[in-house]
Structure formats: structure tokens, C-alpha cells
Image (spheres, rainbow, N blue to C red):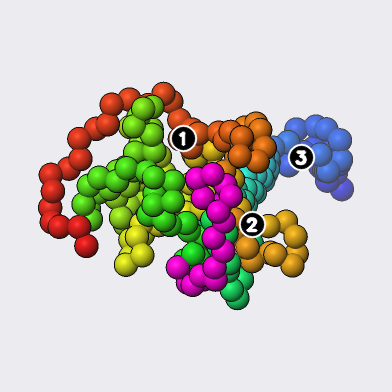
Amino acid sequence: MDKQPKRPDPRRFSARGETGNVNRFTPSPSDLRNARRQTIADRSSDKFREDSLRRSRIRVNQYKIKKKRNDRMKNFLIRAALSLTLALLVFGLIVIVFFSIYNRTETDAPDSLRLLLSGTDDTSTRGKRVDVSRYYRNGTYYLNVTLLAETYSFTTTGDKYALRYILDTATGDNLLVRPGSRMVSVNGTEVFLAAPCVRDEEGVWLPLSFFNEYMSGLRIGFSDKPEWADNLQVSRVLLEGEGSKKVFFPISLKTSSPRACDPLPPEQGPVD
């Protein structure tokens, strides 16, 4: 009986017929190339994901930084606007207070007013009730310069457009006024009035504050006694002596030393 050839043990051969361990598979070169490509692709994919995450983190950080910068700028602009608004309000308040003080009168206008005007020798005092509307105009007390010139013998020249009052021809003290103007010339120096010069049928009027500031030798003001609060008194300032030997301060203007009078403007019409 013929012997059957002995079959090789399949466990000793690989799929390619080579000996080896059981079930051991040796990849082909193409499989190896594919595996390497897959590995590279996986690694590339991981790197891409890492790069994407890194770029996302960078964008988020940049957004946060930009947002913080914008918030800081917004807060700065808000604080600047509030500061500017507050500064403007304070400035406006200061301006209002300044003009309120500047145009403020000594007291509220009384219902009636009595003028006490002392003569040149300060003995003949004339007291009379006067029209409050003439002495108190638009919140400012006025005094009649024409009346003072007549009482204390000031020399008056000019016309209805410009009048000069020469207080003393020896010293040259003089006052040039223009009705309707807030500027007067005191010994040649222009000064600003608290209210405009006024002229009416009774004469020329200047704010009471002008006399207290620029004129010396006269005491002008209201009585301190409550019962005489409506008394406006104009009197001479005593230098020395008593009775008939009284010596008074000369009436003058408190500015720089007097200079020669400037010429008056050309006459433009007759005096009213």
C-alpha cells in the first residue's frame, strides 16, 4: 500500500509559505506604506487640532484684551464727560454768583425814600421824600449828579451827549459822563459803572456805588438805624474843628493825579 505524502503542518507556515509562529502575518510593503501614511495623517490631524485650539485661545485672549481696552477707554470717556460737565456747571454757577454779587444792591428797594442832603457847610440839611423809581432803577441805587453839582458848586460844561463836572478848578478834578454809557472818565481814566448812566428831566444819574468807590470828601449811604432805614444821607466829611470853625475834607475824585481835561466831543445839539 502506497504511503500518502505527509502534509506540512500549516501552523509552521505563514500565509506566504514561510515558517513562523502560528497566525503570524507579515504585512506587505504597500501595507507598510499605508500604515505610515495613516500615522502621518493622524499626527497631522492631532497637530492641526492643537494648532486650532492654540489659535482659538489666542483669539479669545486677544478679544478679552481688546474688550478690556475698550472698556477702559469707555470708562475714561465717561469720566472725562462727567468731569467736563461738572466743570461747566461749576463755572456757570461762579459766573451767576459773580454777576449776582456785582449787580447786587445794598438793600431791597424801600416803599419810600427820604433824601438828606447837607449843604457846603454841612449845617443846612435838606430832607425830602423823593420818587423811589428815580433813585432805584433795575435793581441799582442811583444818585443825582446834577443835584450834587448844584449843591457843592461843581462847574458843569458840555451838552446832552457828554457832560463834564469839574469838582475843583484849582486841582482839576473832573468827571466826564455820557448818558446811556457804562463808562465814565475820572480825571482822564476810563472806569466801568455797575449800571449805565441815566439822564432825565431832573438831571444826570450815576450808580450809588460809583460815589462810594471814586469820590472822597462826601459821606453817602443809608442810615444804620432801623427806624431811618429809608433815609439816604449825603453829608460832608469833617476834618477838624466844631461849630463855625469846622474844616471839611475837600470833595475830590479818588484816582491818579488829575491831568488836563480832554476836549469834549464836538457839540451835537443843544442841552435839553
Part of the protein shown in magenta: 118-134
Q: Position of residue 257 (x, y in %)?
A: 41, 23
> Counting other residues with Cα less than 10 Å from the Cα at mark 2, is it few (<14), some (14-19), or many (20 or more)?
some
SS type, badge 3: loop
Mark carried by residue 25: 3
Task: Please give the name of the residue rendered at 54% of the width and 71% of the height, measured from the top-left corner.
Answer: 129
Mark carried by residue 222: 2
Q: Which is more toward the observer, 29 or 92?
A: 92
As measured in the structure, the alpha-carbon distance from the residue carrying label 2 to the one carrying label 1 is 21 Å
Task: Please give the name of the residue rendered at 25% of the width and 45% of the height, measured from the top-left corner.
Answer: 157
As measured in the structure, the alpha-carbon distance from the residue carrying label 3 to the one carrying label 1 is 133 Å
Picture quarter containing residue 97? Answer: bottom right
Q: Residue furthest front?
A: 244
Q: Identify the amino acid type marked 1.
A: Ser
> Can residue 125 be found in the magenta stretch?
yes
Q: Identify the amino acid type marked 2.
A: Phe
Q: Is residue 107 visible?
A: yes
